Image (cartoon, grey):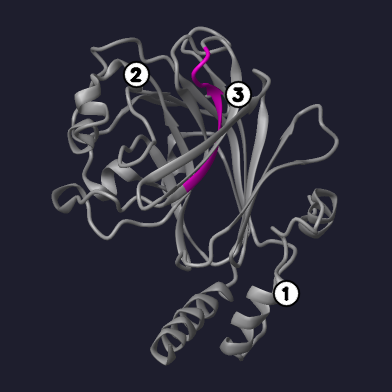
Amino acid sequence: MTRLYTTLALLAISFFAHAQTQLREEKTDFNSMDDLSGWKWLHDTEGWPDKVRKKEVKDGKLMLEMGTSGWFADKNAPFLYKEITGDFDVQARVRASGVKTDVSETQWSLGGLMVRVPKRSGKDQWKPKEENWMFMTTGVAEEPGKQVIETKYTINSKSNLKLRDAKAAWITLRIVRVGNAFIMLYKYDSDKAWTVHDRFYLVDWPPVLQVGLNGYTNSYAVPGNISWGDPLKFNSETFDHLGKPDFVLSVDFVRFAKPKVNYDVQGNPGKQWLNQVYSNRLVDYSVTNNEVLKLLGE
């Protein structure tokens, strides 16, 4: 037990030393493709094929037309991200649509905000059961023509998801990390306040995470022996000749900021760890969504 406590203490010191790094507030508006210069694509960093069929900036919006792909279990899909250290509050105003229609005509065509633990290896050293991430997306899931919000988390490549009704309209998605607490929120343009959609507590995620935009479509078109039986092949090849990829994620802006609430204890990592696991109650059932909103602010 002594060794376990020592290990936990070292992890806590590492996390909270990083967590106190101040995140510089920044906002990416999309006036040209040059605005992506500070971002990274997962297919570049890990060596996968580029499954974005079209990338362009049009009328001040980033338009990403996704190819056949899927974020589930060991499978991956397009992901545009920045590496963020410690606490963050990220917001993105997006619209999910088909290529020519307001609602995608293809099942499992969604996109939005994603938070992912960096992998230790890329395509050439790929191993199963190493995916750890969460996201909040909007688009069409199992029921054709029906817009939803999907939240999903994956731990060691085991995925769990939730689907809820949504509007086919512009929506601002938001994910806030405060220590071990992750809160997902959304707001339509006509809404006066945020809606708290999900709250997660993940004590063992590292200080540095990949945070950004994801999207996927048409995964049902891939044969099951590949889609479910051979995720490495699913990730390594393109399957746009099958089915009908039909998803565009339009992005107005992405904004990063430091959360308005924190549980930092400067200069005392041990007390910092205790303060996080004892005082940070953002995901407790006893704390209402309205109380969470007051703490997080706009």
On screen, residue 108 versus residue 24, left or right, reads: left
The amino acid sitting under disc 1 is Ser
> What whole-number distance in Å separates the C-alpha atoms at marks 1 and 2?
44 Å
Reply above or below: 223 against 292. above
The amino acid sitting under disc 2 is Tyr
Magenta-drawn stretch contains 141: yes
**Residue ID at (60%, 64%):** 87
SS at badge 3: strand
Which residues make up the magenta segment? 134-143
**Residue ID at (14%, 49%):** 124
The image position of residue 12, as x and y in percent, is: 51, 80
Reply above or below: 22 against 12. above
Q: Main secondary structure of the magenta part?
A: strand
The image position of residue 8, as x and y in percent, is: 46, 81
Q: Which residue is mark 3?
A: 148
First of labels 3, 1 by sequence position:
3
The image position of residue 173, as x and y in percent, is: 64, 39
**Residue ID at (26%, 27%):** 227
Question: Depth check: 250 or 13 in front?
Answer: 13
Q: Which residue is mark 1?
A: 279
Mark 3 surroundings within 10 Å by alpha-carbon count, few (fewer than 14), some (14 through 19), many (20 or more):
many
First of labels 1, 2 by sequence position:
2
Q: Which residue is mark 2?
A: 220
First of labels 2, 3 by sequence position:
3
Question: Depth check: 99 or 72 in front?
Answer: 72
SS at badge 1: helix
Magenta-drawn stretch contains 247: no
